[in-house]
Amino acid sequence: MIADELIKNKADRRTRETIIGKLLLDYGFLSRDTIGESRCARPIDLLCIGNRQKQVLFAGAFHGMEWITSLVLLKFLDELCFAVMTGRSLCGVKIGAILNQRGLAVIPCVNPDGVEIQINGASSAGSYESLVEKAGRGITRKWQANAAGVDINHNFSANWEKLKKMELENGIRVPAPTRYGGEFAESEPESRTIASYCRAGNITHALAFHSQGEEIYWDFGDYHEAEALKMAKIMAYSCGYQIGEPTGLASGGGFKDWFEEKFRRPAFTIEVGKGENPLPIEDFDGIYQKIREMLVLAVIL
């Protein structure tokens, strides 16, 4: 299994590559595909286990500061694969047989450029370095967007016109560290990559992992399916999170919202941890242990 020391590092590309390499070495049944590239040509990885014709999707690190979600997903994959390999239960569930019926697809890092910029600075943006320097005024600690200054979780078509109006009302007109949704929906390779995978695949439901707040968002627009609410309540009960509802600029352009509107299937935003982003790596163990059972439930519900 993954050595604890690896989980004690910020999840930049080098750390993720090391962890993913270890997972692939340990678990021959875990597959890895590159399904797209970021603005800076960094690969966007997909890791799959189980049935690929019917999958649950977990996706993390839509935002640069929220790289801790990548570690959560990779740690969970490690435990899941170990349980399958050994025939052991995970949180009391014999997960192997379930994965034969419904697999798990994981995109650990939707926004690899944003994560790299937040951790390692503007020079990580390559040809976009000057844009990042200007947009961030020389500071990247609070960087959420991709290398082009587009917030990936505001770059989907859900409530697009309303979102752009709110951006203008808040003075957001140009690339920025956060909240700028781009010139048009799916203008960015990162958002197109995950959207294309969802369109091509058979995703039963999707979870988008963010930080922070210990909340679960489940509905959007006219999508208020009873089954989705039931799933949200079960997940929330298992980890002590609250069922919430985003407001203001956080209420449009998001992946979860787009998925529900496009496919009329359940999708959830999971806001892990509490505090100020970026959450410190010292919080990782507590975050993971609190939602571990919820992650299992999200696969089997």
Image (cartoon, grey):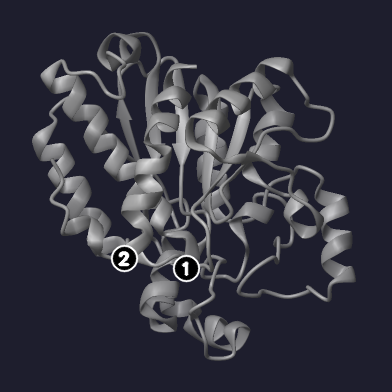
Q: Position of residue 267 (x, y in %)?
A: 61, 31
Residue at the image point whose x is 70% and y is 62% from the top: 182
Which label was assigned to residue 265? Answer: none
Residue 31, percent across and down?
24, 31
Residue for badge 2: 10
**Quarter of the figure with residue 77:** top left
Quick check: can you spot residue 145? yes
**For marks 1 and 2 on the same chain, the one whose residue lies earlier in the sequence:** 2
Q: Amino acid at mark 2?
A: Lys
In this picture, is 278 found above or below 138? Answer: above
Residue found 32% across the figure and 61% down from its top: 11
Question: Which corner quadrant holds the N terminus?
Answer: top left
Q: Are marks 1 and 2 in contact (CB under 8 Å)?
A: yes
The residue under label 1 is which amino acid type? Pro
Q: Identify the residue at image location x=77%, y=35%.
A: 220
Left or right: residue 281 compared with residue 114: left
At 40% from the left edge and 50% from the top edge, which residue is drawn?
A: 287
Task: Count numbered badges in the picture.
Answer: 2
Residue that protrudes farthest toward the bottom in the picture: 138
Disc 1: CA contacts within 10 A as few (<14), some (14-19) or many (>=20): many
Which mark, by number, is residue 278? Answer: 1
